[in-house]
Image: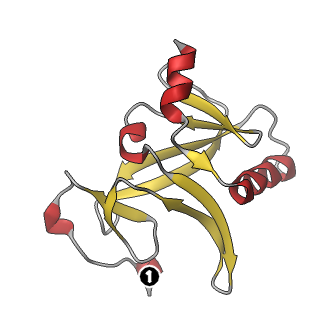
C-alpha cells in the first residue's frame, strides 16, 4: 500500500533549489525527522491558498515521498489540487521564497500564493491581494 501512495504523490516535485532551502531550514532549526508538509486551504483572492510547514506529525492518510533528500508530506485532500505541481525556491530583488507551479490552477494571484481550479468558484476570478501591490 505504501508503494501506491508514493507513486501517487511523486507527481509533486521539489526543485533542487527548494530541497536545499528546506534542508537549510531544518539544519538551522535543528529539526531531526521533520518533513515539508504541503497543503491547500480555502481563502485568498483566487479561492485557494498554498501552505507549507515543517512537520513531524504524520497521519496514516498522509502521502509521503522523498525529493532530493527532503521528505514531502501531503494530505489526501490537498493532493487532488496539487497533482503535477513543482515547488521551487526563488531569490530575486523582491526577496526570496517558495513558488508553486501548479498545472491544476486555471488562474492565480499575482503574488502566486493563491489559485483557482477548473471546478473552483468562478465568481472569485481576478482580484488581488495585499502581497501583489
Query: In the picture shown, does residue 1 fall above or below 109?
Result: above
Q: Position of residue 45 (x, y in %)?
A: 31, 69
45 lies left or right of 31: left
Residue at position x 44%, y 56% in the image? 102
Nearer to the camera, 41 or 2: 2
Residue at position x 38%, y 49% in the image? 41
70 lies left or right of 53: right
Q: Position of residue 115 (x, y in %)?
A: 35, 62
Please identify the quadrant where the C terminus is shown: bottom left
Q: Position of residue 96 (x, y in %)?
A: 67, 73
State which quadrant residue 33 falls in.
top right
Query: In the picture shown, does residue 58 fall above or below 1?
Result: below
51 lies left or right of 109: right
Q: Which residue is mark 1?
A: 132
Q: Secondary structure at mark 1?
A: helix
23 lies left or right of 49: right
Residue at position x 22%, y 55% in the image? 118
Residue at position x 36%, y 39% in the image? 80
Q: Residues within 10 Å of mark 1 (few under 14, many from 20)?
A: few
Query: In the picture shown, does residue 133 fall above or below 106?
Result: below
Nearer to the camera, 40 or 68: 68
Q: Position of residue 5 (x, y in %)?
A: 51, 23
**Residue furthest left as drawn:** 123
Amino acid at each position: 500500500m505504501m508503494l501506491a501512495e508514493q507513486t501517487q504523490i511523486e507527481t509533486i516535485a521539489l526543485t533542487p533549489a527548494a530541497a536545499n532551502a528546506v534542508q537549510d531550514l531544518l539544519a538551522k532549526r535543528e529539526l531531526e525527522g521533520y518533513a515539508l508538509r504541503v497543503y491547500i486551504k480555502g481563502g485568498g483572492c483566487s479561492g485557494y491558498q498554498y501552505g507549507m510547514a515543517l512537520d513531524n506529525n504524520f497521519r496514516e492518510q498522509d502521502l509521503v515521498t522523498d525529493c532530493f533528500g527532503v521528505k514531502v508530506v501531503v494530505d489526501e485532500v490537498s493532493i487532488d489540487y496539487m497533482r503535477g505541481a513543482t515547488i521551487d525556491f526563488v531569490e530575486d530583488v523582491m526577496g526570496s521564497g517558495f513558488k508553486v507551479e501548479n498545472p491544476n490552477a486555471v488562474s492565480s494571484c499575482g503574488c502566486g500564493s493563491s489559485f483557482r481550479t477548473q471546478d473552483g468558484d468562478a465568481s472569485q476570478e481576478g482580484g488581488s491581494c495585499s502581497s501583489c501591490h
